[in-house]
Image (cartoon, rainbow, N blue to C red):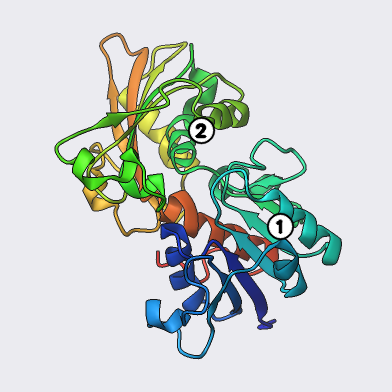
Amino acid sequence: MNDSTFTLGIVGARGHTGAELIKLVAAHPRLELAFVSSRERAGQRLSDHHPEFQGELQYENLDADAVAAKAVDAVILALPNGLAAPFVAALEAAKPDTVIVDLSADYRFDNSWYYGLPELTRGRYNGQKHISNPGCYATAMQLAVHPLLDLLAGPPQCFGVSGYSGAGTTPSDKNNVELLADNLMPYALTNHVHEREVSVQLGVAVEFMPHVAPHFRGITLTANLWLNRVQTREQIVERFQQAYAGEPLIEVVDEAPWVSRIAGRHGAQVGGFTLAPGGKRVVVVATLDNLLKGAATQAMQNLNLALGIDELTSIPH
């Protein structure tokens, strides 16, 4: 058995997702964390923020060329949208076989990158070194809709609610706990980047209405689906059970799942399956932790896949 180790760097390590990635890497027997880059924490010891890491590794403030000069086996980019390109260019120039997992939306529409939602796209992976990690809402939407794709009579309507960690660490109204108290904030009600992402991936127009809630982590995605032929609840449930059989991170449940029960868990739950009278409209609910299956856990699945390691290594399941 091959038990070689791989070196990994994380760019954007201070953010919520970066913190979850660091926990997963700490538990990984075959990954060695070579560097963590964060402008705000440069010079601070990683172990002061993450006691699961011993040793002297410090956060560094690394630009694209400095990241490329580290010559690691894999880099995870956990940056806000629009910042990945210089890092990708520098890594490609310095060491073209570097595995890059990008958590932003920057390459989700680039067909030369593997779109890494393994439960749905694993069959498309054939050795690509560049992997685009899906959006958090986009993951939930696709898990809720994909098993019924051939039954759709029109665009799925998806009502999403996320905890405010999805708004990142840069201060804004959407992560201001005072403004969020006893509140629900609708935003980007048409043409959200995840609406476009899912529409491209599924090949059908999707209508998505996101909201931010006062809880910290976790997404509820309620999908309203009109069907082109009459279905029973049993037929719908069977489709989901077949679609996700053998997928340890996707749990098909009977009742509509609650977001409070998915926070801190690495998988997703899909359930609720409620048919309207007449059998041609069904509502499906998906929940996941936006920082885990919506980001860090999925990145680890993709990284494992690209390095030829068992996909669920270091992921509790």
Mark 2 residue crowding within 10 angstroms, few (<14) / some (14–19) / many (20+): many
Q: Position of residue 60 (x, y in %)?
A: 58, 74
Quarter where residue 306 is shown: bottom right
Q: Which residue lies furthest to the top in this view?
A: 278
**Three-letter amino acid code at the position of disc 2:** His
Quarter where residue 205 is shown: top right
- Front one among 6 and 241: 6
Q: Is residue 252 above or below residue 39?
A: above
The answer, for residue 246, to whether it is visible in the render is no
| Residue on which the image places disc 2 | 194
The answer, for residue 66, to whether it is visible in the render is yes
- Front one among 43 and 316: 43
Look at the image and tell me in which quarter the C terminus lies: bottom left
Q: Is residue 166 above or below residue 70?
A: above
**Three-letter amino acid code at the position of disc 1:** Phe
User: In the figure, is residue 276 to the left or right of 268?
Assistant: left
Q: Is residue 273 above or below residue 59?
A: above
Mark 1 or mark 2, which has the lower sequence index?
A: 1
Q: Kindly identify which numbered label has been placed on residue 105.
A: none
Q: Where is residue 243 in the image (x, y as percent from the top left)?
A: 49, 40
Q: Position of residue 111 (x, y in %)?
A: 74, 38
- Residue shown at 28% from the left, 31% from the top: 185
- Secondary structure at numbered mark 2: helix
| Residue on which the image places disc 1 | 87
